[in-house]
Image (tube, coloured by chain):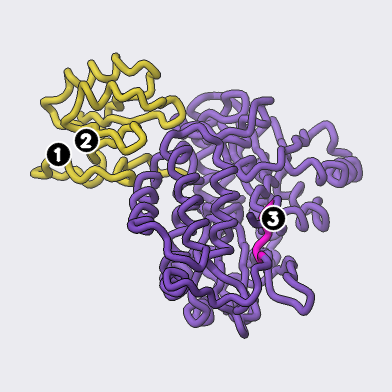
Chain colours: A purple, B yellow
């Protein structure tokens, strides 16, 4: 355990929350010792965010690296059960990889439903236990009582791959995967790249002609292009701009699109993907989404609507079982900041976009 | 030893009994869900808090006993403070 935690160094989780991996390893080891129950390790490939593709690419291209990490983590925390959870489409490939290494009996594969929150830690545990993909309250935490009521280590699949690389002294342990969305001649171009942590954002994502930059995906933040151009892809630099890498989604919004229109269609999706369990999220997100739909139109919005959005945002933060409401209103707040000039233009009946075609991927398309 | 109220957001159905019984530290938002004053429960409110916990039809109001006083509750701080959604001081998560 000490070895892997030491090898992990300052590695942080690549699933979105960015929690230090070594601390997770220690916490689950301690919980297993305290309860006298063997731990469970779950590799989390539940990439519910429509704009994210890096975990799917990793599982398709390098499943053995993920499985190596899963075994190492299992050994480190003394687990007797290893689970790898991913989208149903990824399972046949993973099953082949398990067969190649004679591991079918050692690792259980679990298919996840195509929901935004399916990869949320406690929702994932519920699915592994045969339940619905719904988050639960974090008392007691999953690290103490997760799968089957046992201490459970949940690590994103890229985090597992990084652990495997770090454990064998590979420099790529310090890299990170990003999903990039940029404008191409025939619409949006999406790809996945592996880049060193600390790369200049402008070297990773072409920013020429971008109206704004989305960092961290749909629970992340919009940034003005000149601000994004000065940032590097590390925790501290991004934090200075109020952003974080999240699950590694980067998007350069082309100048011919409307940031408010993009935000409204994403937030409509986020509201629809709420688990609907917690009152403030259930009530707040649909109201915020409906207000953004009005603000996205080049027409005067009802008086006080913007104030409503800010008040509703304050009412959902920190009041859900999971971080879905918090992440969603962080995204909304950044849009209202960065696209403030566009808000003023819309209020005057104008929109500076020249096409209404949606840029960011949203299932079912923009409304 | 100090105590702190907590709402289980999944269990809570917005019945509102907590705000009726414990208006000193619980208010309802515009959708009827409870907002708690941040920080530890003031010492004099132990009994009404126990009553409110017992009266919650959804069993969603919980009273946690803390061995160590939580952050941001130094001596001299008066409660209730500002009631905001983000002020519940949830336990850190990963």
Q: Nearer the viewer, mark 2 or mark 1?
A: 1
Give residue B79's mark: 1
**Residues tagged 2 and 1 counted as in contact (Cβ below 8 A):** yes
| Above/below status of A97 relative to A255 | above
Q: Quadrant of the N terminus of chain A?
A: top right
Q: Which residue is mark 2?
A: B40
Q: Taking the image as drawn, is residue A26 in sight?
A: yes
Q: Are marks 2 and 1 on the same chain?
A: yes
**Residues tagged 3 and 2 counted as in contact (Cβ below 8 A):** no
Outermost residue, left side: B76
Q: Which residue is mark 3?
A: A365
Q: Say which element carries label 1.
A: loop
Seen at 49% across and 82% down, the residue is A226
User: Image quarter for residue B35?
Assistant: top left
Label 2 chain ID = B
User: Image quarter for residue A336?
Assistant: bottom left
Q: Where in the figure is residue A201, as x and y percent of width and height?
A: 58, 76
Nearest the viewer among A170 and B28 is: B28
Label 2, label 1: how far apart the Cα atoms are: 9 Å
Label 3 chain ID = A
Q: Where in the figure is residue A147, as x and y percent of width and height?
A: 62, 29
Nearest the viewer among B58 and A106 is: B58
Label 1 chain ID = B
Which span is picked out in magenta? Answer: A358-363
Within 10 angstroms of label 3, few (less than 14), some, or many (20 or more) residues?
few
Give residue A35's mark: none
Q: Where in the figure is residue A18, as x and y percent of width and height?
A: 53, 55
Whether the magenta-drawn stretch holds residue A213 is answered as no
Q: Quadrant of the C terminus of chain A?
A: bottom right
């Amino acid at each position: 355990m000490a070895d892997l935690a030491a090898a992990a160094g300052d590695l942080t989780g690549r699933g979105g929350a960015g929690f230090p991996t070594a601390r997770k390893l220690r916490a689950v080891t301690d919980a297993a010792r305290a309860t006298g129950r063997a731990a469970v390790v779950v590799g989390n490939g539940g990439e519910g965010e429509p704009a994210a593709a890096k975990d799917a690419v990793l599982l398709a291209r390098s499943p053995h690296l993920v499985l190596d990490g899963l075994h190492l983590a299992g050994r480190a925390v003394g687990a007797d059960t290893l689970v790898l959870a991913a989208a149903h489409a990824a399972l046949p490939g993973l099953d082949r990889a398990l067969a190649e290494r004679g591991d079918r009996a050692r690792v259980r594969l679990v298919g996840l439903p195509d929901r935004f929150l399916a990869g949320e830690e406690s929702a994932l545990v519920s699915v592994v236990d045969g339940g619905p993909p719904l988050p639960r309250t974090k008392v007691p935490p999953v690290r103490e009582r997760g799968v089957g009521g046992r201490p459970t280590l949940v690590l994103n699949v890229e985090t597992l791959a990084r652990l495997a690389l770090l454990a064998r002294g590979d420099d790529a342990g310090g890299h990170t995967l990003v999903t990039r969305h940029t404008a191409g001649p025939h619409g949006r171009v999406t790809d996945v790249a592996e880049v060193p942590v600390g790369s200049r954002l402008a070297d990773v994502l072409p920013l020429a002609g971008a109206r704004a930059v989305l960092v961290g995906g749909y629970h992340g933040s919009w940034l003005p292009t000149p601000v994004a151009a000065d940032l590097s892809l590390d925790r501290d630099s991004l934090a200075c701009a109020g952003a974080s890498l999240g699950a590694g989604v980067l998007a350069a919004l082309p100048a011919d699109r409307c940031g408010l229109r993009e935000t409204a269609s994403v937030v409509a999706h986020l509201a629809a993907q709420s688990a609907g369990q917690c009152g403030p999220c259930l009530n707040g997100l649909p109201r915020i989404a409906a207000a953004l739909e009005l603000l996205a139109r080049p027409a005067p919005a009802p008086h006080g609507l913007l104030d409503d959005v800010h008040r509703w945002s304050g009412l959902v933060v920190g009041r859900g079982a999971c971080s879905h409401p918090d992440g969603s209103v962080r995204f909304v707040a950044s849009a209202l900041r960065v696209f403030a000039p566009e808000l003023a233009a819309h209020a005057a009946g104008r929109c500076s976009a020249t096409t209404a075609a949606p840029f960011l991927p949203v299932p079912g398309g923009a409304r | 030893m100090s105590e702190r109220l907590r709402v289980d957001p999944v269990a809570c159905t917005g019945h509102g009994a907590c705000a009726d019984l414990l208006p000193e530290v619980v208010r309802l938002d515009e959708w009827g869900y409870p907002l708690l004053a941040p920080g530890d429960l003031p010492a004099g409110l132990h009994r009404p808090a126990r009553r409110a916990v017992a009266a919650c039809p959804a069993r969603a109001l919980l009273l946690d006993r803390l061995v160590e006083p939580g952050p941001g509750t130094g001596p001299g701080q008066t409660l209730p403070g500002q009631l905001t959604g983000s002020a519940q001081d949830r336990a850190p998560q990963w």
